[in-house]
């Protein structure tokens, strides 16, 4: 009985040591990206959320049969191959993805199908902590369309605005939609939030997929509204007020509105019933 009590913590500790040893440089890259990349400042909380979701289901996991499965071996091998490619090409993204794959494979080998299935979302959610290499490229591509849509929107309410590329000109001022304001940050953040929200809702897989995919247009619309609101403030009170006061505040405000949009999408499927996580 005493040995059984300490088996799980020991296995988890050994697994953690192995992963940290193998992926030390990748973990350093992840922490550096979370600290410096404006698209992934929330990266720190993703593994915390995953860990909490696993801890919250500890009673359920304890009741599941633990039958080690050899099916995890090819999963681990595939993950290690991806890790090798990532190290050889100095492509940290591949190495970070492989770490999650290896973690899933080790769970399958040690605990079996039942436990792995129960932990599929908490493990899969870790993918949202990995910076996408093409995120800056996509962000750059979104700059001009975001500027164009915002200029068109404020023109509807009588504010003269013209967009040339990523630059928007008003009567007495000009603004450039930079990469951080392109909407990519909102897209990544809202997709992460939508995945968690869909998981916590009780409902069909169709509902969950719709909620997750709705994050993309909601994030884009929220960003266009944010840029438009900055232009409205600039037109009424001047560019200094718009940039120095309203700019940062509008980011949180419009993201909150987009998050509320996710709630509305979920509500369209009926009453919201959440899994108990506290």
Image (cartoon, rainbow, N blue to C red):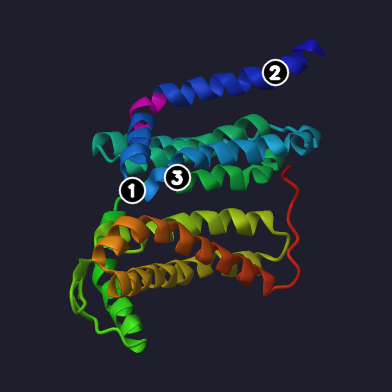
Q: Which residues are magenta?
A: 22-26
Assess disc 2: are there few (<14), some (14-19) or many (≥20) residues with their C-alpha within 10 Å of its C-alpha. few
Q: Is residue 270 magenta?
A: no
Q: Earlier in the sequence, mark 2 or mark 3?
A: 2
Q: How many marks?
A: 3
* Secondary structure state at the residue bearing disc 3: helix
Seen at 71% across and 15% down, the residue is 6
Q: Which residue is mark 2?
A: 7
Q: From the viewer's side, name the closer residue of 188 and 118.
A: 188
Separation of residues labelled 1 and 2 (CA atoms)? 41 Å
Q: Main secondary structure of the magenta part?
A: helix
Label 2 with label 3: CB-CB less than 8 Å:
no
x, y percent for residue 149: 32, 79
Seen at 77% across and 32% down, the residue is 62
Separation of residues labelled 2 and 3 (CA atoms)? 33 Å
Residue 231 - label: none
On screen, residue 100 above or below 14 = below
Q: Which residue is mark 3?
A: 42
For the C terminus, which image quadrant?
A: top right
Seen at 39% across and 28% down, the residue is 23
Residue sitting at the far front:
237
* Secondary structure state at the residue bearing disc 2: helix
| Number of the front mark, 2 or 3 | 3
x, y percent for residue 218: 48, 70
* Secondary structure state at the residue bearing disc 1: helix
Q: From the viewer's side, name the closer residue of 9 and 251.
A: 251
Assess disc 3: are there few (<14), some (14-19) or many (≥20) residues with their C-alpha within 10 Å of its C-alpha. some
Residue 38 - label: 1
Q: Residue 146 appears in which quarter of the rendering?
A: bottom left
Residue 70 visible? The answer is: no
């Amino acid at each position: 009985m005493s040995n059984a009590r300490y088996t799980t913590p020991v296995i988890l500790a050994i697994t953690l040591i192995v992963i940290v040893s193998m992926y030390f440089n990748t973990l350093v890259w992840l922490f550096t990206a979370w600290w410096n990349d404006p698209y992934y400042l929330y990266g720190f909380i993703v593994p915390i959320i995953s860990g909490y979701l696993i801890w919250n289901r500890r009673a359920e996991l304890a009741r599941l049969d633990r039958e080690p499965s050899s099916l995890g071996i090819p999963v681990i091998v595939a993950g290690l191959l991806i890790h090798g490619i990532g190290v050889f090409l100095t492509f940290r993204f591949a190495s970070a993805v492989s770490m999650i794959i290896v973690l899933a494979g080790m769970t399958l080998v040690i605990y079996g199908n039942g436990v792995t299935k129960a932990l599929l979302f908490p493990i899969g959610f870790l993918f949202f902590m990995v910076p996408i290499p093409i995120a800056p490229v996509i962000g750059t591509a979104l700059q001009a369309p975001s500027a164009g849509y915002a200029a068109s929107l404020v023109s509807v309410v009588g504010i003269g605005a013209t967009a040339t590329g990523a630059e928007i000109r008003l009567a007495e001022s000009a603004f450039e939609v930079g990469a951080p304001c392109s909407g990519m940050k909102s897209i990544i953040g809202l997709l992460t939030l939508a995945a968690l929200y869909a998981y916590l809702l009780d409902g069909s897989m169709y509902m969950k997929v719709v909620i997750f995919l709705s994050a993309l247009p909601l994030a884009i619309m929220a960003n266009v509204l944010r840029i438009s609101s900055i232009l409205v403030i600039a037109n009424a009170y001047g560019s200094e007020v718009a940039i120095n006061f309203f700019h940062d505040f509008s980011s949180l405000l419009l993201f909150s509105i987009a998050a509320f949009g996710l709630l509305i999408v979920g509500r369209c499927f009926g009453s919201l019933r959440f899994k108990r996580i506290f």
